[in-house]
Amino acid sequence: MLLRSTAYGRIGVLLLLVVAVAAWLLPPYYTGLIALVGLYSLVTIGLNLFMGYAGQVSLGQAAFFGIGAYGSAVLATRYGVSPWIGTIVGAILAAVVAYALSFVALRLRENLLALATLALGIVIGVVFSQWDYLGGTSGIKGIPGFALGPHLFGLRDYAVLAFAVLAIGVWFAGNLVRSSFGRALIAVSAGELGAQALGVDAERLRRQTFVLSAVYAGVAGGIYASYQSYIDPTQFGFLLSVQFVLMSVIGGIRSLWGAVIGAAVVVALGQVLQAVVPLVLPSARGDFQQFFLGIILVAMLILLPRGIAGRLAEGRA
Amino acid sequence: MLLSSIWQYVLAGVVVGAIYALVAAGFVLIYQVTGIINFAQGEFTMIGAMTAASLAAAGMPLPLAALLAVLAAAVVGALCYLLAIRPAAKATGVTLIFITLGLDVAIRGAGLFVWGTNPLSLNAFSSGTAITIFGGVLPPQAPWVLATDLVVFAGLYLFFRHTYAGTAVRAAVANPPIASTFGIPLRAFAFWSFVVAAAIGGLGGVVIAPIQSPTFDMGLNLGLAGFVAAVLGGLDSLPGALLGGFVLGIVENVAGGLLSTGWEEGIGFLILVIVLVLRPQGLLGRAARRA
């Protein structure tokens, strides 16, 4: 079941082609959303590796996304470093922070791990908003965009870039999950003692997965900073971490393509709510989407605990 | 000079810490009875504060507004359990974490719909000047806050130690399967733990409303602080919740006052992380029930 092979790969290539074509046909506003779906999917895949396959939990993934974004943005605005390199450095930075934090966080399980990652996410958010070097509460403006030679990236290019990186991310994660590493991960989430008895170094495995999930988030964050062209601490808060969890749960926590489904559903939902709710409730302001996000999260977990991708897999089995 | 300002921060910390202790008591109650960490706990406090403030603003006498606010929080707590927790009874730990997380976000969003983004306000329960202790100043609302803590924690203590039902709850906490064979209704206890925890949280919201102009999103930070207080004291210890609340309130205020208030929030979580690493069972807790 879990070690499914090539069928998904073909679906994936097809999906990428559809997105690439759609990015050229649709108006720029929608291609921008497609780019966002690609970036969020990338974060969610990392999260699924950590939560779905390794059986852990992280409520602070937005922080790694933010570290990638700030890393790339600071390098670009202060030192004129190209976003291509900035994104890589941002991802490395996220990995280093995750590695350091893993010694604190990964000693804990379930409830306390959830609490610790939540707390660390918020502490990192406080660092974003209080460190003047990072622009404080007003954030960083005028972040240079990606460029290939003389060609500056537009929204379409970002959509293609995001999905190209996503394709690499899925390919890598797919291979990883099917490798002995992935089987060891699943063994750990099924029963740590049993896995250890078979010679699996559970702690090391959890740490590697945590760092890997931070790399996925960091890469996405680095691209996001240039795509958005300005960042501030409110973009990487608790609500975004909850949204990543929601994407993971909607798509199916132990699924790679589910991450793309989850990200697409949450982004589309945000757009629909933003358009529809003010018509029904003209007084609605602020982050009112969170009400629906919360309800949907609860409803999904009760009605469809394995997510859409999990459900589809059941139907076929 | 420095000493007197530190003393002032300590006093301010005591008032905030008393509220943290109430939120923490709610966490501990639910955790002890059900094993669930209820991420929505802070929202009960928001509902209490916002309901009391808006009813009082509409001209309702304060005691009635306060009573209705606590009832409103209790009803929301009951609904949380019946609509979200009970249906997922067979779910694993991580799923339950996500469910209470969803409840937290949903209730905050509902608060936004009902009350909008503007802060409300509520007059202090008793008029009068600020109270001075050794040169430090307490707001007139402070005695009400501290008295509420006293009543709630004394009430919980008497219930658990000196009533039949309280003893049954303790039995259920100590060994659910055996308690169940003796006819102790575990599900009913789980339901009531949510109701009582929500009511206590709501009451905390009512008494803090005059000090901290309540907003729809106050529940997140209060809930997280209540969490830190509960973990600090020991997740399975009500006296720990009280101690943890005061320690966190004081440390946060003193450190925040000496550094800068912007970092204050981060300090609380830094404490949480340190406690989780060095002493995961908390100051007064027994060894962790579930690792």
Image (cartoon, coloured by chain):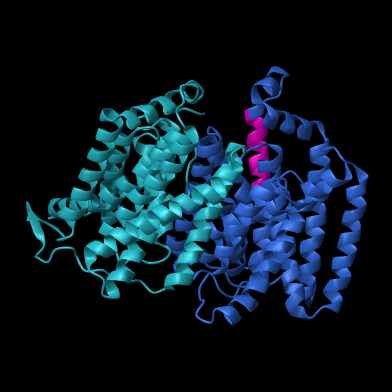
Quadrant where the N terminus of chain B is found in the figure: bottom left
The extreme top residue here reads A197
State whether residue B89 is above or below residue B116: above
For the point 51% across and 76% down, which residue is it? A285
Q: B145 or A56, which is in the foreground?
A: B145
For the point 18% across and 63% down, which residue is it? B125
User: Residue B157's quadrant in the figure?
Assistant: top left
- Magenta-colored stretch includes residue A18: no
- Magenta-colored stretch includes residue A207: yes
- State the image coordinates of residue A41 (x, y, percent, origin top left): 72, 57
Characterize the magenta stretch by its predominant secondary structure.
helix
- State the image coordinates of residue A203 (x, y, percent, origin top left): 62, 29
- State the image coordinates of residue A282 (x, y, percent, origin top left): 53, 82
- Colour assignment, chain A: blue
Q: B85 or B189, which is in the foreground?
A: B189
- State the image coordinates of residue B282 (x, y, percent, origin top left): 37, 32
Q: Is residue A68 left or right of residue B146?
A: right
The extreme front residue here reads B183
State whether residue B289 is above or below residue B47: above
Q: What residue range appears in magenta?
A: A203-214
- Colour assignment, chain B: cyan
Q: A182 or B113, which is in the foreground?
A: B113
Q: Is residue B184 left or right of residue B206?
A: right
